[in-house]
């Protein structure tokens, strides 16, 4: 007998960025409920290892697509690779920044690549994979975003802007598709223990990370609340609520999230 998750969102789920961290946790939770999964990522060996583990553990079908989601035709390629599968659940997870540095300290191509993966590809995936769900009157779409979406911040101007795009896109689609049987959720994450996050901390020379969310807990909560959109703020006392910075003026919110970066800039400006 199909599980409630498989009935609502089966028989196939796609996880864009599904080979490690939060994406792999999603893949395990979804597969454990009897939904076949397509895992997408760039590093083939990591992807295959994850796929083998899921097949062995849950006995579902697992397909892998080695793909860079930041290239312009990524999503049309993914749509071709999955044609013939009835995809009832799409999780767009890939989205982290590799390092936080001031805007002009990164080359333009790196910024453009982040925007293509975090904005254009997310929108195109929602369009190409959401359309058949809306036509069937059944499906789920999870866009993984970040607390960086709440306000602009120094050293993460582009990353924060892309995550705000994902948040607003999910909210709009939720409003459009709630009457069409498609659940849309913007999953807002804070600091979470993933390989990607650990690499970023190391690259920035940061000390011990402090308390981090567990990817398994994050994925479990998101799937349990997929129908409670438009937003789920993992770890918040008010997970379906608004921005935790909402009581501040925009200026104070930006200065607060910019922290030492903006203080340094002000000092540098004085020199
Ligand atoms: N970790 C945190 O503290 C944190 C905090 C707030 C929000 N978030 C959000 O949570 C999501 C997951 O973050 P994460 O820390 O797990 O790191 P991530 O790098 O966004 O996700 C890792 C997964 O995405 C794949 N991936 C990354 N870039 C890709 C690309 N261009 N094309 C295809 N696959 C790609 C990775 O495999 P390959 O590297 O092999 O491609 C891996 O499977 C992101 O949307 C991020 O913005 C994370």
Image (tube, grey):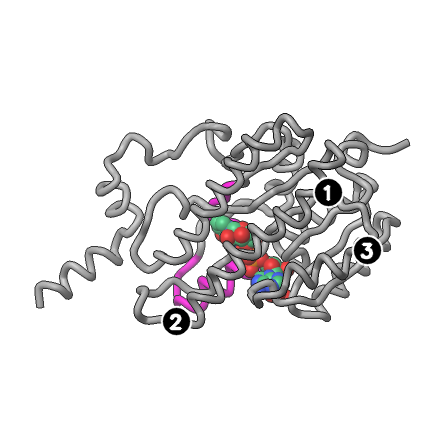
Please report the bounds of the magenta region as a residue range. 188-208
How far across and down, in percent of the image, does residue 261 sit? 26, 58
Taking the spot 38% from the left edge, 73% from the top edge, the residue there is 107
The answer to whether the residue bearing label 2 lies less than 8 angstroms from the nearest atom of ligand 1 is: no
Circle on res. 96: none
The secondary element bearing badge 3 is classed as strand
Query: Which of the two discs, 3 and 1, sits closer to the camera?
Result: 1
In which quarter of the view is residue 77 placed?
Answer: bottom right
How far across and down, in percent of the image, does residue 39 sit? 72, 57
Taking the spot 32% from the left edge, 71% from the top edge, the residue there is 105
Q: Can residue 47 be seen?
A: yes
Taking the spot 76% from the left edge, 65% from the top edge, the residue there is 48
Circle on res. 108: 2
Mark 3 → mark 1, Cα distance in angstroms: 21 Å
Q: Quadrant of ligand 1?
A: bottom right
In which quarter of the view is residue 209 placed?
Answer: bottom left
Q: Which residue is mark 1?
A: 132
The secondary element bearing badge 2 is classed as helix
Along the line of sight, the residue nearer the viewer: 122 or 28: 122
* Badge 1: residue crowd in 10 Å (few <14, some 14–19, many ≥20): some
Disc 1 + disc 2, Cβ < 8 Å: no
Along the line of sight, the residue nearer the viewer: 140 or 145: 140
How far across and down, in percent of the image, does residue 215 sit? 60, 47
Q: Which residue is mark 3?
A: 62
Among numbered discs 2 and 3, the one appearing first in the sequence? 3
Among numbered discs 1 and 2, the one appearing first in the sequence? 2
How far across and down, in percent of the image, does residue 65 sit? 73, 63
């Amino acid at each position: 007998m199909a599980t409630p998750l498989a009935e609502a969102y089966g028989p196939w789920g796609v996880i864009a960025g599904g080979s490690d961290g939060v994406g792999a946790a999603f893949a395990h939770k979804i597969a454990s409920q009897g939904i076949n999964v397509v895992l997408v990522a760039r590093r083939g060996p990591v992807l295959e290892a994850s796929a083998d583990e899921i097949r062995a553990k849950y006995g579902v079908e697992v397909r892998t697509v080695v793909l860079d989601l930041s290239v312009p035709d990524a999503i049309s390629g993914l749509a071709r690779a999955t044609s013939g599968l009835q995809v009832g659940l799409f999780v767009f997870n890939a989205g982290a920044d590799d390092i936080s540095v001031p805007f002009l300290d990164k080359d333009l191509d790196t910024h453009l690549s982040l925007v293509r993966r975090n904005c254009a590809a997310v929108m195109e995936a929602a369009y190409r994979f959401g359309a058949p769900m809306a036509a069937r009157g059944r499906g789920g779409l999870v866009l993984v975003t970040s607390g960086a979406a709440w306000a602009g911040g120094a050293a993460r101007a582009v990353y924060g802007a892309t995550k705000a795009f994902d948040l607003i896109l999910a909210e709009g689609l939720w409003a459009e598709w709630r009457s069409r049987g498609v659940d849309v959720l913007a999953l807002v994450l804070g600091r979470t223990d993933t390989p990607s996050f650990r690499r970023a901390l190391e690259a920035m020379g940061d000390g011990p990370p402090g308390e981090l969310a567990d990817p398994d807990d994050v994925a479990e909560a998101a799937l349990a609340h997929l129908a409670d959109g438009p937003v789920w703020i993992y770890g918040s006392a008010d997970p379906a609520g608004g921005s935790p910075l909402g009581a501040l003026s925009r200026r104070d919110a930006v200065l607060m999230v910019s922290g030492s970066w903006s203080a340094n800039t002000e000092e540098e400006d004085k020199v």
